[in-house]
Image (cartoon, rainbow, N blue to C red):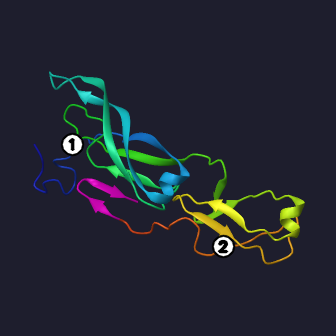
Amino acid sequence: KGSAFSSAYGGNATPSRPPLPPVLSELECTLEELYNGIIKSLKYKKNSLGYDKRTTVEKECSVDVEVFPGYDKETVVSFKGMGNEAPGEKTSDLLVKIKEMPHQFFKRVNGKDLIYIKRLTLAQALNSEPVKINTLDGRILSITMDEIIAPQTIKIVRGEGMPIYTKEISVKDMSVK
């Protein structure tokens, strides 16, 4: 029943079970989606209580995930109470990890920098022809090559990398870390 000290020294202590593990899922995103932002539907499986509220059944669910511009492969979106269910337990969370898919032309490095490799003919290099690049948001950049071009020439275009997502948000039952 307990002691005069209540639960201070374990008088009312009941063995606690570890919380239900979260449901882990990956959301594949293209570099364009991570640059511009998008809402994507994700299907996932979880254990759900059956009609008798004592047994669990595997159930397929879906959730819309808002991908903000600048998300990267380190981003995990948490949906509170949308994970596994078990009798007498608090429903676990759904954790969605962003998975960046490879891009045909761009490579993301250091979280914000984009690398684009352009092959030029000898004539284009000798004439310092502007290089045209289709950006991830549909614009066409014309980059002037105002220096002598060699095979290892690198041209930095300031302000044209990935957006940087830094804000921690909480929307309804969704939080981003």
Please indicate, yes or no, whether residue 73 appears anywhere in the rendered image.
no
Q: Quadrant of the N terminus?
A: top left
Residue at label 2?
A: 157
The image shows residue 159 at horizontal and vertical percentages of 58, 74
Q: For the magenta stretch, what is the residue range?
A: 169-177
- Looking at numbered disc 2 in the image, what kind of residue is underneath it? Val
83 magenta-colored: no
Q: Nearer the viewer, residue 79 or 89?
A: 79
Residue 157 drawn at (x, y percent)? 66, 73
Residue wearing tag 1: 14
Q: Is residue 165 left or right of residue 61?
A: right
Q: Nearer the viewer, residue 70 or 104?
A: 104
- Please report whichever mark, 1 or 2, sits nearer to the chain's N-terminal start: 1
Residue at 25%, 53% (x, y): give it: 173
Residue 40 spot, x, y in % from top left? 38, 45
Position of residue 43 relative to residue 170, above or below, is: above
**Is residue 170 covered in magenta?**
yes
